[in-house]
Amino acid sequence: MNFSVVIPTYRRAASLEATLESILRQGDAVREVIVVSQSEDEAHEAVVRMMTALGLGSNQLRLLRLAAPSSTAARNAGITAATGDWIIFSDDDVIWPDGLLVRLIAKLSAAPDIAMLAARDLSRVETSLSTAQRWFGAFFLVNTWAALTEGRILPSIQGRYPSPIRGDVPTEWAMGYWFAVRRDHLAAHGLRFDERLTRYAYAEDLLFSVQCARAAQRSGLRSVLSEDIAVRHLATDEWRTSARHVDLAFAWNRLFIASQLYAGAAFWFRLPAIGWSMFHQVISRMIRRRPWAYLVYAHFLGLLYLGRIRAGELEPLYRRHLP
């Protein structure tokens, strides 16, 4: 059993270096690390210099480059280039603890019916929500009334994991900072990231991972979220998307994803759920004294452009509304 690691990177050479150093300590099970750079010339050259120092040109470490930034296109380029039995999608600011792949191999060898495996984040404090906190979220459709026992996609098109995560639990999705999928599973079902979600934004990985999990279920295979498989997601500020970009993507991408996952009445049931869940964010931001008005505006624009968003015409809308 061996692994191809796919890492899209954009303006994060320093963070990427720490990520790669932690991966290269994992040993021979890493067949190849495929870094897909989408940065401008100066930032790209920083990545080249760093990877050269780590051993660029070896069979284990490969660098691809895209002409324009797109996390989905970058990951698809990695899928095309990958040759391992499994593909691990990792962000460029994730530290892999020593022995991670030893534990992963043991788990996958003992459970050959797993098609997708998601990791938990060691940087996130996993505490049980109080009944009041859970019910407040459930009222706005961003949580469930009962404590979660599996990874779920809610009607508001937001993904939730159990907290805390105990053992191996079923999941309908995988958080994009780190998850592994069998390469033959992707090939058998023609699974790719939807490149109409062009930007580093919100939930590009949610749509893909849900499609992977659904295909696994149809094939009698499992998708698992594991307590034992854990990484440290730094969520570095070396480069971040703008606040307005995040707000637009939070509203628009969920509308697009809902249109891809649900047809007919099922989509129209989720449309008001997406809008209603916005108030949870607004209240939370008010409590924290953070800006919230543009988030409401983003949801208004989502309704205004609903037809174009459902058709996947997102990039022209981003260019119109972002500087």
Image (spheres, rainbow, N blue to C red):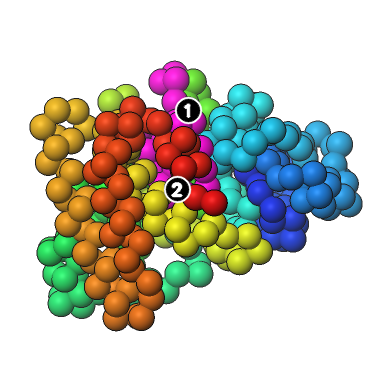
Provide the secondary structure element on which disc 1 rests: loop
In this rendering, would 204 be left or right of 277? right
**Residue 105: horizontal and vertical position, in percent?**
55, 44
Decide which of tag 2 and tag 1 comes sooner along the chain. 1
Provide the secondary structure element on which disc 2 rests: helix
In this rendering, would 62 be left or right of 160? right
Q: Is residue 102 visible?
A: no
Q: Do residues under tags 2 and 1 come within 8 Å of each other at their CB atoms?
A: no
The residue shown at (70%, 41%) is: 37
The residue shown at (85%, 37%) is: 58
Q: Nearer the viewer, residue 213 or 309?
A: 309
- Look at the image and give the residue range highlighted in magenta: 188-212
Q: Which quarter of the figure has residue 294?
A: bottom left
Name the kind of residue labelled 1 in the image.
Answer: Arg
- Single out the mark in the foreground, 2 or 1: 2
The residue shown at (88%, 46%) is: 52
Q: CA distance from mark 2 to mark 1?
A: 28 Å
Tell me: residue 162, above or below residue 28. below
Q: Which quarter of the figure has residue 15?
A: bottom right
Characterize the local packing of mark 2: few (<14), some (14-19) or many (20 or more) Cα atoms within 10 angstroms: few
Name the kind of residue labelled 2 in the image.
Answer: His
Tell whether position 110 is magenta: no
Q: Is residue 123 visible?
A: yes
User: What residue is disc 1 on?
Assistant: 192
User: What residue is disc 2 on?
Assistant: 321
Q: Nearer the viewer, residue 255 or 294?
A: 294
Residue 42, labelled with which disc?
A: none
Tell whether position 191 is magenta: yes
The residue shown at (43%, 39%) is: 317
Q: Nearer the viewer, residue 68 or 302?
A: 302
**Residue 132: horizontal and vertical position, in percent?**
15, 77
Location of the N terminus by quadrant is top right
